[in-house]
């Protein structure tokens, strides 16, 4: 169950088919909430080690569906 009050943790991405390993990479980059991911420019997200442009597009799409 996802808490809809306040910032949503990045772990919620797993409910949209994003791999736990990719979620871990986002957390390691300092992104702990869905809202933080949406605030980061795509060019900065592309600098997250281990995430391709295709994965970033899927993550952004999943974030938009969650908020």
Image (tube, rainbow, N blue to C red):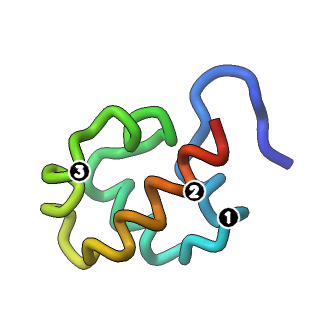
62 horizontally vs 3: left or right: left
Distance between the Cα atoms at labels 3 and 1? 19 Å
| Total labels drawn | 3
Q: Secondary structure at mark 2?
A: helix
Q: Residues within 10 Å of mark 2 (few under 14, many from 20)?
A: some
Q: Which mark is residue 16?
A: 1
Mark 1 residue crowding within 10 angstroms, few (<14) / some (14–19) / many (20+): some
Residue 18 at x, y percent in the picture: 56, 71
Q: Nearer the viewer, residue 23 or 56?
A: 56
Q: Residue at x 47, y 67 (%)?
A: 58
User: How many C-alpha atoms fall within 10 Å of the one at disc 3: few (<14), some, or many (≥20)?
Assistant: some
Q: Earlier in the sequence, mark 3 or mark 2?
A: 3
At horizontal 61% and vertical 36% (from top left) the residue drawn is 8
Percent coordinates x, y for residue 26 in the rendering? 36, 58
Between 50 and 42, the residue placed more toward the observer is 42
Above-or-below relation of 2 to 46: above
Secondary structure of residue under mark 3: helix
Looking at the rendered structure, which numbered label has been put on residue 33? none
Q: Which residue is mark 3?
A: 42
- Circles 2 and 1, Cβ within 8 Å, touching? The answer is yes
Residue under pointer 2: 62
Image coordinates of residue 60 in percent, x first then y, are 44, 54
- Comes first in the chain, label 2 or label 1: 1
Q: CA distance from mark 3 to mark 2?
A: 14 Å
Name the spot of residue 40 as percent of width and height, x first: 27, 39
């Amino acid at each position: 169950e996802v808490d809809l009050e306040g910032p949503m943790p990045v772990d919620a991405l797993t409910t949209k088919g994003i791999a736990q390993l990719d979620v871990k990479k986002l957390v390691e980059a300092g992104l702990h909430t869905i809202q933080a991911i949406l605030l980061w420019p795509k060019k900065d997200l592309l600098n997250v080690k281990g995430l391709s442009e295709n994965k970033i597009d899927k993550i952004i799409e999943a974030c938009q569906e969650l908020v």
